[in-house]
Structure formats: structure tokens, C-alpha cells
Image (cartoon, rainbow, N blue to C red):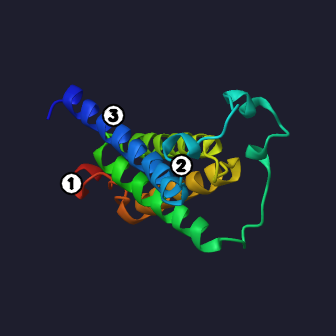
């Protein structure tokens, strides 16, 4: 695959992953809703909540409540980051790692913003941080586990004399 096709594949993959994650939120709410699709979204909500420090989006919560769900978010976003770092079309692995973490963090942000609009859900910036930390941690471990030893740059014995 050439660079252009590979980048298109990467972007398509990101769009599909983002769509799947936001679809899971919608399906979760539809399962609980009785009045159909229109009833799962909040009325009178706009993106201005992102600029309101008093918005519930910025409320903190105890990490011990729903710990299992937070752990799953950490793990799932970590796996997504590993997958994206493997398919990103760049030769330098550290650039692929940075791109994967940034992309996965963006997917997490989109998901949490979307959840803020759902009636039965609440998007939280702390969840974005948990998702981002998962992607960062997994990519760092991958880097440590696959790190190549430094090349021996010493001169051969024949050239030393």
C-alpha cells in the first residue's frame, strides 16, 4: 500500500471506531428508552457546556464507584491505541505512538461529548482522561517491550589501529 492509500485506510478506521463507540452509547440508551430515538437525547443542549466550568461535564466523581467500568474504558482505549499505532502510516514508531495516543484521546473526547447529549448518560472530562491514560500507558508499554537495542557504533578491531 502506498502512503496515500494507507493514510486513507487509517482515517477510515478511525471513523469506523468512533462511529462504533458512539453507536454503543446510543444502543445502550435505546435499550432503556420506551419512546424511541427522539427520547434518548436531552432537550435544549448545546456545545456551550464545554466552555462552562460549572457544567456537569467537569464534575468529578469517585473512581471507586463503577471501578470496573472505568477499568474497561482504560483497557479498551489502550487496545484501540495499540491497534492504531500498528496501522498508522509512518516509519518512525514514536510518531506512530504519538499519533495513536492523540487519535484515541480524540475518539474518547468525541464519545464523552456525545454522551453529554444523551438523556440517561453523562459525559465527563475525567472519563476522557481515563481513556487517554489507557491509550498512553498501553503505547508506552508497547514501546518498552519492542524497543530495539541501540546499534553498536564502535569501530571494528581492524579500524582501531
- Residue bearing mark 2: 35
Q: Which mark is residue 158?
A: 1
Where is residue 50 shown, x and y percent of the image? 72, 33
Marks 2/3: CA distance? Answer: 35 Å
Distance from Cα at disc 1 to Cα at disc 2: 83 Å
Picture coordinates of residue 141 (x, y %)?
Answer: 46, 63
> Does dot 1 land on a helix, a strand or a loop?
helix
The residue sitting at 57% across, 44% down in the picture is 39
Q: CA distance from mark 3 to mark 1?
A: 51 Å
- Which of the two marks, 1 or 2, is nearer to us in this view? 2
Question: Where on the picture, by quarter, is residue 54?
Answer: top right
Residue at the limit of the structure toward the right, as seen here: 54
Comparing 115 with 142, the one in front is: 115
Q: Counting residues from the N terminus, which is met first, the one under dot 3 or under dot 1? A: 3
Q: Is residue 2 left or right of residue 105?
A: left
Q: Is residue 109 left or right of residue 45?
A: left
Task: Determine the secondary structure under disc 2.
Answer: loop
Q: Quadrant of residue 18?
A: top left
Residue at position x 53%, y 49% from top? 35
Residue 153 visible in image:
no
Q: Residues within 10 Å of mark 3 (few under 14, many from 20)?
A: some
- Residue furthest toward the front? 35
Query: Mark 3 and 1 residues: CB-CB less than 8 Å, in contact?
Result: no
Q: Is residue 79 above or below residue 14?
A: below
Secondary structure of the residue carrying numbered label 3? helix
Q: Is residue 34 in view from this perspective?
A: yes
Tell which circle, 2 or 3, labels the residue nearer the N-terminal end: 3
Q: Which residue is mark 3?
A: 11
Residue 143 is situated, as x and y percent measured from the top left of the image, at 42, 57
Q: Position of residue 108 (x, y in %)?
A: 54, 47
Quarter of the image with the N terminus in it:
top left
Amino acid at each position: 500500500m502506498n502512503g496515500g492509500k494507507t493514510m486513507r485506510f487509517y482515517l477510515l478506521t478511525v471513523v469506523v471506531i468512533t462511529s462504533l463507540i458512539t453507536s454503543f452509547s446510543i444502543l445502550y440508551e435505546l435499550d432503556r428508552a420506551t419512546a424511541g430515538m427522539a427520547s434518548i437525547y436531552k432537550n435544549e443542549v448545546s456545545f456551550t457546556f464545554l466552555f462552562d466550568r460549572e457544567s456537569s461535564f467537569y464534575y468529578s466523581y469517585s473512581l471507586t464507584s463503577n471501578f470496573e467500568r472505568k477499568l474497561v474504558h482504560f483497557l479498551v482505549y489502550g487496545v484501540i491505541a495499540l491497534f492504531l499505532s500498528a496501522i498508522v502510516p509512518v516509519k518512525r514508531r514514536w510518531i506512530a505512538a504519538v499519533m495513536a495516543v492523540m487519535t484515541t484521546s480524540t475518539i474518547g473526547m468525541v464519545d464523552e461529548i456525545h454522551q453529554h447529549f444523551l438523556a440517561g448518560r453523562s459525559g465527563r472530562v475525567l472519563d476522557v482522561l481515563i481513556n487517554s491514560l489507557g491509550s498512553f500507558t498501553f503505547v508506552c508499554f508497547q514501546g518498552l517491550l519492542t524497543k530495539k537495542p541501540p546499534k553498536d557504533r564502535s569501530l571494528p578491531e581492524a579500524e582501531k589501529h
